[in-house]
Amino acid sequence: MNRLFFCFLLLTALLLPQKITTPLEESNFKKLTSHAQVLDFIGKLPKTKAPFVTETIAVSAKGREIPVLKFSLKEFGTDPAKLKVLLFAQQHGDEPSGKEGALMLIRDLVSGDLSPLLEKLDIAIVPMMNPDGNEGNRRRNGNGADLNRDHLLLLQPENQGLHNFYNRYNFDVSMDVHEYSPYSESWMETGYIKNSDVTAGRLTNINTPEALRNFSENEYLPFLAKYVRSAGFSYAEYTPGGPPEKEYIRHSTYDINDGRQGFGSLGTLSFIQEGKNGVDSVENIKTRSNSQKTGMTAYLKFMFDNAGKIKEMVQVEKKKIVEGSPEKVAIQMIHTGNGKKLEMHLLTMATGKDTVVFVNDYRPVVKSVFDVVKPAGYLIPADDKELVNWANRHKFIMTKYSPDKSDRIEEYMITKIDSMDFEGDIVINPGYSTATLTSKELKGDYYLITTRQSGGNVVVQALEPKSIIGLATYKYFDYLIKAGTKYPVLRLVK
C-alpha cells in the first residue's frame, strides 16, 4: 500500500503543472537576480501556453548579452492588426525591482495567466537593459554612462541595440521601468519623503503628438491608478523636483535623451514607470517587485482593452510626423504653473505616518519659449564623421545632397554664447545671425537629412543651435558651436 501510495504521489507530481518561480522568489526575496540567472531562467521557460522567441538585442559594454522575449501567436510583428507593445526595464543597474517585476510578468505570461492578451497584442519584454550595472549594483553601465541620458546620442551599445530593435518593428507603445529614490538629502531634511509604490509619467515634450499626451493623461493614468490601488499598492503621478517650497514640482523632463520622450518623439504612445527604491537594493524588494509587476500588468491590460483605438491613433500621428507635423518645433521649453496646487501624499519620517502636503509651486504645464519653423531638411558636412555616425546610429533617412538651383539654404553665424536654465542645469544659449545662401555658394560635400521622416522632430531638436536639448549641449558635440564661427549644419528651406 505504501509503495502504491508513493507511486500515486509521484505520478501526480509529474502530471500536475509545476509552478514557475523567479530566481528572486526562489531565494525567498533575499538575493537579487544576477545576469546569469536571468539567462538561465529564460532558457528554461515553457512555450506551450504563451509562445515566445528569445533573441539578443545587444551585447553590453562589458560583453554581457541583453535578451528580449517576443511573445506572439504568430511570427512577431507580422500581423498588422496587432498592437506592438514594448517594455524594457533596469536601464539603471541599482534599480532592480523593474527587472524582478518584469521576470514575474514574463512568468505570468508563460504560465497562461496573461496569455489571452496575445489575441490583440504582440509583446516584447527586455527585463534587463543594464547587466553590467546590475552585476555591480551601480547606476551606470560598463562604460560609466547613464543609459537613460543616451537616447539622443546613442553612444552606448545597449541603447543602440534597443533602438535598432525598435526600428525593426516600429512599436506602437512603449514603457520604460525605473525606480525613484525617496531618500535624497534635500527631502530627508524636510522630515518627509515620497511614499508611492508605483508612479508613472507620460509624454511631456510638446513636440510629441498632442493626441497621445491627452490620451495618456485622461485615459491611461486614471486606469493605472485604479488598478494599482485595487491591488493594494499606492500610486501617484511621477513628480520629480522638490522638495516643496524649496524647489518646484513638475511632471518629468521634456528632454528627448531618455527612453520615454525619445520613443514618444517618433509617435509612439510612451510611458515611464518608477517604483519606490529601498534604503538599499534588497530592502523591501518583495513589495517593490510585486508593485512594479502590478503596474506593468496594468499597462498590458490597458493596451489590450484599447488596442484598436490606440493602433489607429498612433498610426495617424506617426503619419502626421512623416508629413511634417508640427510646422513649428519648440527647441526651448519651460515648466510652468496653471493656477492649481498639487496634493502630495508623503511619509512623515518622525512618526512613520502618511501626511498630505499641498504644493504651491506646482508646474505641470510645458510651454515653448523659443521655436523654429521646420525646414525641409538639414545639411551636414560629409567630412564630419561624428555627425554622420550619429545620424546612422538613429537610422535617419540621409542622402548625398545634390544641389538644385531653386534650393534656398540658411546659414547661422554664432555671434555670442549665453546660458540659460534647463530644469536646474545651466546650458548654452547661443545668439546668431542668419544668412541666406544659394546651392552654388556651397563649398564641400553635404548629406541631407530630411525632416519628412519618423525622426523628423528629433532631427530639428538635435541640430538647431539654440536647442537646449540639442547635440551641442553635450561635451561630445560642443565643437559645433564656437562664438565668431559659422555653425556647420545648414538648413535647407525650399
Image (spheres, rainbow, N blue to C red):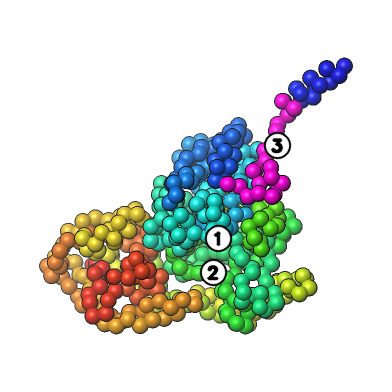
Local packing at callout 2 (Cα closer than 10 Å; few below 14, some 14-19, many 20+) is many
The tag on residue 19 is: 3
In the rendered structure, which segment of residues is drawn in magenta? 13-34
Q: Say which amino acid is labelled 2.
A: Ser
Secondary structure at numbered mark 3: loop
Q: Is residue 16 magenta?
A: yes
What distance separates the C-alpha of mark 3 from that of mark 2? 39 Å
Q: Which residue is mark 1?
A: 272
The C terminus: image quadrant: bottom left
Q: Position of residue 265 (x, y in %)?
A: 43, 62
**Of the image marks 3 and 1, the number of the one nearer the N terminus:** 3
Identify the residue at image location x=32%, y=67%: 477
**Of the image marks 3 and 2, the number of the one nearer the N terminus:** 3
Q: Is residue 152 above or below residue 188?
A: above
Say left or right for 300 vs 5: left
Q: Which residue is mark 2?
A: 252
Identify the residue at image location x=50%, y=69%: 253
Q: Is residue 145 above or below residue 344?
A: above
Local packing at callout 1 (Cα closer than 10 Å; few below 14, some 14-19, many 20+) is many
The N terminus: image quadrant: top right
